[in-house]
Image (cartoon, rainbow, N blue to C red):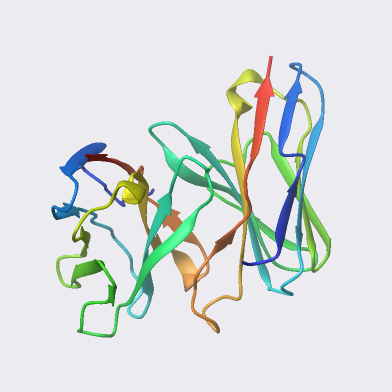
Amino acid sequence: DAGITQSPRHKVTETGTPVTLRCHQTENHRYMYWYRQDPGHGLRLIHYSYGVKDTDKGEVSDGYSVSRSKTEDFLLTLESATSSQTSVYFCAISAGQGGTGELFFGEGSRLTVL
Amino acid sequence: AQTVTQSQPEMSVQEAETVTLSCTYDTSESDYYLFWYKQPPSRQMILVIRQEAYKQQNATENRFSVNFQKAAKSFSLKISDSQLGDAAMYFCAYPTIGNEKLTFGTGTRLTIIP
């Protein structure tokens, strides 16, 4: 199994509070991704990173920011959580097309915003 | 805009029978991979099968095979001899710009009838 750890795995918070989700990898893969999963929408890309300090937006990036100060860590921050951000968040990693192109996923973090 | 389509939100199949899940996509890349992922109730995303677009031969992994039609941009998954453990959400995924981002379909929930 790919070494990907997400924390926290479950979190309940209130509207307007900041939230940070952490993704940690031990594979030294270049690419890291944050997706959210919602019924009827599948997985949608929030942000991704192609190297330390190199990040870019995905299709649903509004209300989210990310940081990657080390190869192994990719943080997703909700500056002021809203109920629409209640979701399951998945981190994924990839070696890129230099590898197989496959994404390896963490176990997901369920966030509930009340 | 995402243009991957899984037109079957739900499907069911009798145990030991064969079922085909459909997926169509749009990409401007000429050389890419396509993926089917499985998400059982545990929520863990598991790679089922990968197809390399430049290979004409359809990929096969045990009971799982694909029908890849590059010109039609169609990538269906066939599951033979369905088993109870095949019950899951199935997502197809294809690469977008630069081949480094995967876009996922909305998923098909597969139920196995004993």
- The residue lying furthest to the front in this view is B114
The residue that appears at 38% across and 73% down in the rendered structure is B33
Tally of numbered tags: 0
Q: Nearer the viewer, residue A19 or B8?
A: B8
Q: Which image quadrant: the N terminus of chain A?
A: bottom right
Q: Image quadrant of residue A18?
A: top right
Compared with A6, B111 (above or below) is: above
The residue that appears at 47% across and 58% down in the rendered structure is B46
**Apparent side of residue B13 relative to residue A85 in the rendered image (left or right):** left
Q: Position of residue A2 (x, y in %)?
A: 64, 67
**Apparent side of residue B11 relative to residue A97 in the rendered image (left or right):** left
**Apparent side of residue A72 relative to residue A94 in the rendered image (left or right):** right
Q: Nearer the viewer, residue B79 or A19?
A: B79
Q: Where is residue A110 in the image (x, y as percent from the top left)?
A: 64, 33
The residue that appears at 36% across and 73% down in the rendered structure is B29
Q: Image quadrant of residue A111?
A: top right
Compared with A82, A60 (above or below) is: below
Q: Position of residue B70 (x, y in %)?
A: 20, 73
Q: Position of residue B83 (x, y in %)?
A: 27, 52
Report if residue B105 is visible in the image: no
